[in-house]
Amino acid sequence: MLLKDNIKKLMDNFEEGDALALSEIKDECQNIIQQFAGDPLHEVLGSVPAYIQICARIPSIQTQCVELVKKIITGVEEYQQANEEDKKKALKQIKRQVNKLQSIVEKNNKDLTTLPKPQEQQKEEAKGYTLEDFSHLVDDYKLLQQFFSEATEHLDSAQFVLLELEHDSTNKELINTVFRNFHTIKGSASFLGVKNIEEISHAMEDIFATIRDGKMILTRELVDVIFYGIETLRTVLDIMQSYDFKAEEIKKSFTTVNVFPYIALLKKILQEYQYKKIGEILQEEGKLTPVQLQTVLEKQKETDKKFGEIVTEERLVEHDDLLAALQKQQKLKTKIKKIGYVKVSNEKLNSLIDYVGELVINQSMLKQEIEKNRGSLSISERTLSQADMITSAIKDLVLSMGMVPIEEIFNKLRVVARNTAQELHKTVFIEVHGEETELDRNVIETIYDPLMHIIRNAIDHGIESPEERVKAGKDKVGRIVLSAEHKGSGIEIVITDDGRGIDIHKVLDKAIAMQLVKKEDVTKLTEKDIYNFMFLPGFSTSDNVTAVSGRGVGLDVVKKSLEQIHGRVEIHSEPGKYTRFIIKLPLTLAIIEGFVTIVGNNKYVFPFNSIEEILVFNKNILQRQENARESILYHREMHIPVIFAHEIFKEDYKERDDDRLLSLIFAFDQAKYCVVVDSILGKQEIVVKSLGTMLNEYDYFSGGTIFGDGSIGFVVDLQGFIDAVK
Amino acid sequence: MKKIVLVDDSDVILDIVSQALKMYGYEDILRAKDGQEGLQVIKQNQGNIALCIFDVNMPKMDGISLVKEVRKFDNTTPIIMLTTETDKSKIITAKEYGATGWIVKPFEAEKFIKVVEMYVTK
C-alpha cells in the first residue's frame, strides 16, 4: 500500500518535462506489476512502463498520461480490495484506462517530429477591431445622427440613475432603468452595425441583468467601472460626430480605438463576483426539480417566509442538503473557504512541531546507522524508506497545520488599494490569483506591511491618472495583478501593475546625486544593480511628497522585513508598460532545505535554495585587485567576489595540496557570491533550532541544528553572512 | 550504438556524469564545454545521436539557445536539460524551444541513469 502512496505523491507533484519523476513513476509501475505476477492484472498492466517510456519523449502528452496512470493505480487499489465478482469489473475498468493510454501514446508517437509551437501571445487585449468588423455599418447620415442623439440621451439617463443607485444600490426600478438604457443602445447599435458600441453595451447589459436578478451586488467599485464604460461609449460616439457621420471615415477611425480590455474586464467581473440563489444551487445539484422550484418560488411570493423555510416545511429537500447548499452559496458570496476548524493552542502546536523535528533528526540518525552497518543488519531498504516517508508525511502535515491561506491578506490589500486609489483619484482594478496558497502563520504576519507598501507605491507612482492612461493608449482603469504560488521549496508572490514602469534614468540620476555611484561607473551597472538602489534607505525618485508615498521610507522597509523571514525581493519593469515585484518566501521557518558543508572543525548549513552551483577551481585563477582584500573570480562572464568562509567563522584554514578550492556560488540580493568551504556533505532537511542568547550576537547564524550522528551545526543566515563580509 | 552528447562548462559535472554513464555501459560519449562547441559536435554527428544533455548556464552560448539551434535541424533527438532549483524558471523557455525534459541538480547517479535508460536503448 505504501508503495502506491509513493507513486501517487510523485504523480501529484508531476510537472511536464520532469524526467527524473517520470523515470521514477515508470520504476514504481514496474514494481507494482511485479507484485501481481500470475494474476490476470499482470498482463493488463504489462505494457504500461513501456508507454511511460515513450511519453518521456513527448512532453506535451505527459500530464495527460500521468493522469491516466493515476487512474490506473487507483483502479489497481480497488481491484485489490474487491471481492471475486467485483474484481472482473475493476479489471475491465483498468483495461479501459490502459487502452486510452495506449491510444494517446501511439497517436502522438507517430508525429514525433512535430515540435511544440512556441506559445503565441495572443491576448484578447492585443486584439483590436478590423475594418471588416464594421462592414455592416449603415452609411446613412440621418440614421447615424439619430442614433448618436438617442444613445447620448440614454447614457445621460444611465449616468444620472447610477448616481442615485450609489446610495440606494438595491432599488430594482433604478437598476431596471439602467439595464433598459444599455439594452436599447445595444439594439440600435447592432441594427446599424456599430459593432464596438454594441459589444460594450452588451457587456454592460449583462452586468445589470445579473444585478437585477440579485446575483451580484452593485458596489461602489462597480459603479466606478461602469462610469468609465459610459465615458468610453461617449468617446466612440464623439468619433462618429467628429467625422460628420461619414461611414467610411468612421470605420477607419474605429479600428484605432481598442475597447477589448474594457469588455474583458466586464466579463471578468461578471464571472468572479456572481453568486447563485439557493434554489438554483439545489436545482443544479439535482435536489430539486424545476417544477418544484417554481412552486416554492410562487409560495414564497404569497407568504413572508424564506425559501429555506418553505423547502423544509414541504419536505422537498433534506435538511442536510439545504445546509450544504446554503454553505455553497456563502462560499460563492464571499469566496472565502470555510473549513471546519479545531482550535489548538499555539503552545501545543509549537511543541508538536518540536517533537516532529526530533523525529526527523531521529530518523536521519537511524538512516546513518543502518548505512554504516550495511549488510550486518537485516533491515530491508523498503522498511527504511517507509519510515522515511511516514516521517516526512507527518512533518508535512504538522507544518501545514501552522499554515494559513494568504487570502486574508490579499483581501485586506484590496481594501488598501481601493482607499489609496480613491485618495489619488485613480481607478484601479485588482486581480487576485492563488489566494488559496498557504503560508506559515509567522510569515503571513510579517508580509502584510511590505505588500501594503508595494501596492500603495504601485497606485501612487505606477498607475497613471486616467487622462494620462488614455493618452498612452491604455485602458482608463489601472490594473494590478496580485498572485501567489508555490515555486520550488518556497512561495512566490508577484505584484504587477500596468502603469508607467520605472524610469531607470531617474533612478540613476538620483543615485548619482546621493553619491551612491560615480558618474563614470554608471555604464558598469546592470539593470538589477540600478533597481537595487531603490531598496536603499531614503531613496525616492518622486519629486513631491504625497500623503501616500514619496518620503523614501518604503522599499528599504520592505526589504528589511522580508529579509527577517528569509525572503527575497526583485524588481522587473518595462518603462510605459509595467512594474513587477517578485517576492520569494520560504514555506516555513522551522524546517529548511539545507546544504551541509564543513569549514574548519565545524559543520555549517547554507540555505539550499540560494545556491546556484558548486564550483571547484584552481586557486591561481583568482584575481586580486590592488589594495583590495577581496579576491575576484571570473566565471560565466561575471566577476564574482570570493569569500573564504573560514575568515567569517574564524575557523582554521588548511591549504590543500592541489591548489584547488571548493566553493558554492550563491545568488543573493540580485548579486552573486562565491563562498569557499573545506568540504561538502550534501543536501538535507534541517530542523532549525534557536541558538539561545549566548550566540545571539552572531548575526550570520539564524540558528543551529543537530545532525543524525549527534553532531551539531550552525545554520547560516545569508544576509548576516554577506553583511559580515562587508 | 548511438552516442550521448554531454554539454556542460563544469569539468566536475562532465567527469561525474560520463563516469556514471560508462559504469552502466554507455561508452560512446561526446563532451563539449560550451554551447558553440556543443552545436558543432552535434552537427558533425547528426543522425548518430541517441540523447543530448545540456547544462542551462554556459558561456558563449547557453543551453537554451543551444536547444533552439539544434531544433533547427533536428526535431527528434531527445534533449534533457540540467538545471538548478534557482534556475527552474528558465526551463519553460527551453521547453518552448523543444527541450524534451529536465533534471534538477544535484541528482543521484542511479536515478540519473534510470532517466537515460528511458531514452537510450543499449
Image: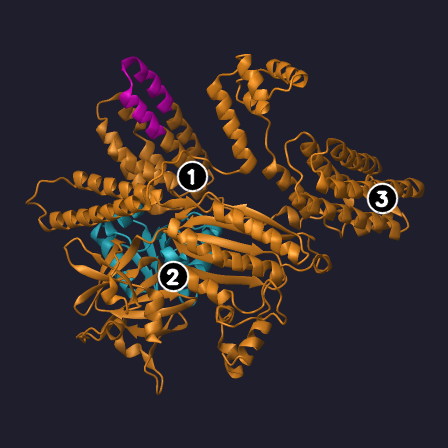
Q: Which chain is orange?
A: A
Question: Callout 3: few (<14), some (14-19), or many (20+) C-alpha neighbours within 10 Å?
Answer: some
Q: Quadrant of the C terminus of chain B?
A: top left
Q: Residue furthest right?
A: A142
Q: Which kind of residue does numbered mark 2 sit on?
A: Gln
Chain letter belonging to callout 1: A
Mark 1 element type: helix
Q: Are marks 3 and 2 in contact (CB under 8 Å)?
A: no
Mark 3 element type: helix
Placement of A82 over or under B22, stated as above or below: above
Residue A138 in the image: state x and y as whole percent: 87, 40
Question: Depth-wise, is mark 3 or mark 2 nearer the camera?
Answer: 2
Q: Are marks 2 and 1 in contact (CB under 8 Å)?
A: no
What residue would you read off at disc 1? A63
Q: Which kind of residue does numbered mark 1 sit on?
A: Thr
Placement of A389 over or under A698, stated as above or below: above
What residue would you read off at disc 3? A152
Do marks 3 and 1 share a subunit? Answer: yes
Mark 2 element type: helix
Question: Callout 1: few (<14), some (14-19), or many (20+) C-alpha neighbours within 10 Å?
Answer: some
Which badge, 2 or 1, comes first in the chain's sequence?
1
**Would residue A89 be counted in the magenta stretch?**
yes
Q: Residue at x 20, y 52 (%)?
A: B23
**Prevalent SS, magenta region:** helix
Q: Which kind of residue does numbered mark 3 sit on?
A: Thr
Residue A480 in the image: state x and y as whole percent: 58, 53
Q: Which residues are magenta?
A: A72-95
Q: Residue at x 45, y 55 (%)?
A: A447
Task: Report the Cα–Cα distance between label 3 and label 2.
Answer: 57 Å
What residue would you read off at disc 2? A564
